[in-house]
């Protein structure tokens, strides 16, 4: 069983526009409104492929009810901690080949609400083998929350998809490491202090930065990805596509990693599945959605090569 943790879920609204201008009236030709947040996008994709999962996190107010109802409609099991604050809304404006996002900070989590979640997580840790925690932390939570999650899941396979201070402290300060992380190029630059032209991803993955984290996948966008698994490095290449909506592709990739890890698939097959999910999501308007009918064909187009 896979548990997805979304500390700061949101109602995700996407507007599709021919063009977008500041200081002007903009009209959209289509829109989509769904229960969102990075961990919930992971949940949606896992459900599409028939995985046994449970989604958890914090949810409050009418927006929280919308999210829980949206998951129920998709037959996704969930156990959210009910909070006093209102769950946030995130807006994505899709125009031409770009996506402009506006994200609310979200509610403030109280000490009591945090403890209630941690007690729930201890119970869930007895029932599941793989965990994913994705996205930002809401107000009221800091890195100490991440430390507690790492401790509770230390005997499980935990995939962390976060950024900024939380990622930095996990990599450089935490005595308990997750099983996997998935930084992008910007996050690698933040961690190393290097400029893009100075980055040598393979050398960084072979070095000491990630030595205690078994699986590290670095997203390279259209260039695919480079990953470390234990003592080996892998390069993944993806086909050229005409992306419809790239939002949620990273989360879909996490879903593929989680599935492969939970089902103990061979590592190349796990990487191929993860990259396929990411590309398939980019072909759809809906965030956190893949057309399962195209999966096998896409897997044939993904190349995974061991480079060291």
Image (tube, grey):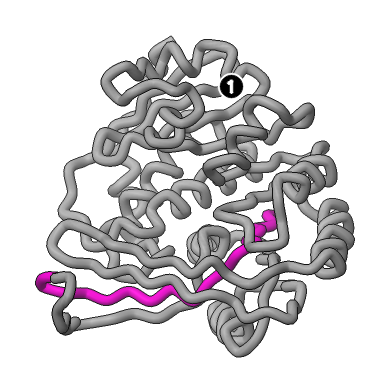
Q: Which residue is mark 1?
A: 210
SS label for mark 1:
loop
Is residue 276 or residue 190 the one in the foreground?
Answer: 190
Position of 130 compared to 127: left or right?
Answer: left
Q: Residue at x 38, y 62 (%)?
A: 290
Q: Is residue 119 above or below residue 285?
A: above
Q: Residue at x 50, y 28 (%)?
A: 191
Q: Position of residue 54 (x, y in %)?
A: 69, 65
Q: Is residue 234 above or below residue 18?
A: above
Instruction: Quadrant for the C terminus, please.
Output: top left
Question: Which of the 4 image quarters holds residue 127?
Answer: bottom right
Local crowd size for mark 1, using a 10 Å CA cut-off: few (<14), some (14–19), many (≥20): many
Q: Position of residue 194 (x, y in %)?
A: 39, 21
Q: Is residue 16 magenta?
A: yes
Q: Position of residue 233 (x, y in %)?
A: 46, 17
Is residue 90 or residue 246 the one in the foreground?
Answer: 90
Determine the main secondary structure of the stretch shown in magenta.
strand
Position of 144 compared to 8: left or right?
Answer: right
Residue interval drawn in magenta = 1-20
Residue 1 makes an appearance in the image: no
Q: Is residue 180 magenta?
A: no
Q: Residue at x 29, y 32 (%)?
A: 237
Instruction: Quadrant for the N terminus, please.
Output: bottom right
Question: Which of the 4 image quarters holds residue 264?
Answer: top right
């Amino acid at each position: 069983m896979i548990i997805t943790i979304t500390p700061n879920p949101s109602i995700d609204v996407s507007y599709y526009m021919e063009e977008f201008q500041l200081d002007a009236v903009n009209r959209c030709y289509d829109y989509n409104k769904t229960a969102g947040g990075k961990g919930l996008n992971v949940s949606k994709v896992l459900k599409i492929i028939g995985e046994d999962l449970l989604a958890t996190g914090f949810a409050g107010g009418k927006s929280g009810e919308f999210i829980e109802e949206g998951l129920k409609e998709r037959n996704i099991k969930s156990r959210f901690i009910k909070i006093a604050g209102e769950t946030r809304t995130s807006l994505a404006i899709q125009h031409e080949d770009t996506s402009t996002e506006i994200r609310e900070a979200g509610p403030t989590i109280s000490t009591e609400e945090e403890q209630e979640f941690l007690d729930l997580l201890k119970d869930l840790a007895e029932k599941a083998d793989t965990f994913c925690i994705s996205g930002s932390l809401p107000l009221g939570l800091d890195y100490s929350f991440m430390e507690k999650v790492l401790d509770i899941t230390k005997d499980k396979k935990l995939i962390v998809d976060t950024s900024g201070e939380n990622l930095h402290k996990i990599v450089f300060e935490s005595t308990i490491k997750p099983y996997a992380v998935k930084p992008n190029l910007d996050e690698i630059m933040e961690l190393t202090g290097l400029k893009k032209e100075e980055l040598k991803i393979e050398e960084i993955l072979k070095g000491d930065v990630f030595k205690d984290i078994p699986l590290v996948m670095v997203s390279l966008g259209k260039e695919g990805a480079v990953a470390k698994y234990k003592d080996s490095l892998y390069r993944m290449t993806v086909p050229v596509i005409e992306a419809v909506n790239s939002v949620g592709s990273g989360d879909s990739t996490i879903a593929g990693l989680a599935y492969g890890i939970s089902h103990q698939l061979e590592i190349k097959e796990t990487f191929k599945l993860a990259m396929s999910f990411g590309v398939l999501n980019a072909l759809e308007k809906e965030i956190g959605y893949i057309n399962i009918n195209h999966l096998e064909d896409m897997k044939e187009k993904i190349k995974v090569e061991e480079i060291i």
